[in-house]
Amino acid sequence: MSKCTEIHPICPVEATVYGYYPNVGGNAFLLTIFIICTVSQLSLGVKYRLRAFTTVMVIGCLLEALGYIGRLMMSKNPWSGVGFRLQVICLILAPSFLAAGIYLTLKHLVLYIGPENSRLAPKWYTWIFISCDAISFLMQAAGGAAASSSDGGSAAETGNNIMIAGIAVQVVTMGICGLLAVDLPGGRSGTGAVGQVIRPSWMFRFYLSASAAAFIAIFIRCIYRLPEMAGGWGNPLMRKEEEFIVLDGMMIAVACLLVSIAHPGIFFPAISSREGETSKTQAKSTHPVDSEYPMGSVPASS
């Protein structure tokens, strides 16, 4: 973005894209959280055999950690080209993987609360939302690479516009997914396959609540990123670290912590590869209440 490589009278910190020295304490704190979440997701994923979910979550958490390593590099030298590229690319792309993790669980959620309760067939949650997430990811990756590797001018502006379009696709995708998810009866009492009134267990409710909160946190981050990027490199909003730490860093940290604490392997074991393979068989079993709510739900008293 500039020929400057370090702080100098002719290359002051005010002339950098962000205009400040990234706060060491705040960024180190977030780095620690993402390292913990990476290790947690990897260990729990191996234990509960959640290959796809674990892959996207570990990549997402790891990218966040790398992004904050980049910001810590910039706290020593705001002109660090490596630090700048690392944090731009990694922090832009990471939420796409985290959102993908939530999309992957929706298919299994719909299968176990009953496909008839969803406006969309279970398989389409994966196909539609993962595909849109992939498109968003590719757009942001291409834009981020172009913007961070250019020396300014039209190339940087073009890259920035591509990133904005990718984030916009992500926001729309998450918005539609959120509307469909809100319509699901998973967190409240419902009617089973034979007309029984069923009540989901506290573990299932906790899992749903944590997943919903994580989804909202990622959504808030994506909405924040739209005006932050739309103003162009070095715009006033981009130069406010407090807003970035709260609306980007903390939102994603909260999402990662929630998904790690309320891990589906523990609170929604039906998603595990071992049990997931038998979902169709269970749905046709002679115990429809258990197949509808596998998390220990019980018939509500009449």
Image: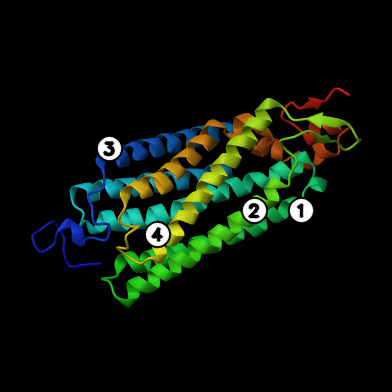
Q: Amino acid at mark 4?
A: Glu
Q: Which residue is most to the bottom?
A: 154
Residue that badge 2 annotates: 177
Q: CA distance from mark 1 to mark 3?
A: 46 Å
Q: Earlier in the sequence, mark 1 or mark 3?
A: 3
Q: Amino acid at mark 2?
A: Cys
Q: CA distance from mark 3 to mark 4?
A: 23 Å
Mark 3 or mark 4, which is nearer to you? 4
Q: Earlier in the sequence, mark 2 or mark 4?
A: 2
Q: Nearer the viewer, residue 165 or 289?
A: 165
From the top left corner, tell me how far across and down residue 92 is, in percent: 42, 56
Residue that badge 3 annotates: 25
Helix, strand or loop at disc 1?
A: loop
Q: Earlier in the sequence, mark 2 or mark 1?
A: 1
Q: CA distance from mark 2 to mark 1?
A: 13 Å
Q: Nearer the viewer, residue 29 or 227?
A: 227
Q: CA distance from mark 2 to mark 4?
A: 23 Å
Mark 1 or mark 3, which is nearer to you? 3
Residue that badge 1 annotates: 121
From the top left corner, tell me how far across and down residue 262 is, in percent: 57, 32
Taking 302 as reference, is 34 above or below it? below
Q: Residue at x 76, y 33 (%)?
A: 293
From the top left corner, tell me how far across and down residue 287 is, in percent: 86, 30
Q: Amino acid at mark 3?
A: Gly
Q: Amino acid at mark 1?
A: Ala
For label 3, count other residues whose C-alpha is less than 10 Å away and answer few (under 14), some (14-19) or many (20+).
few
Q: Earlier in the sequence, mark 1 or mark 4?
A: 1
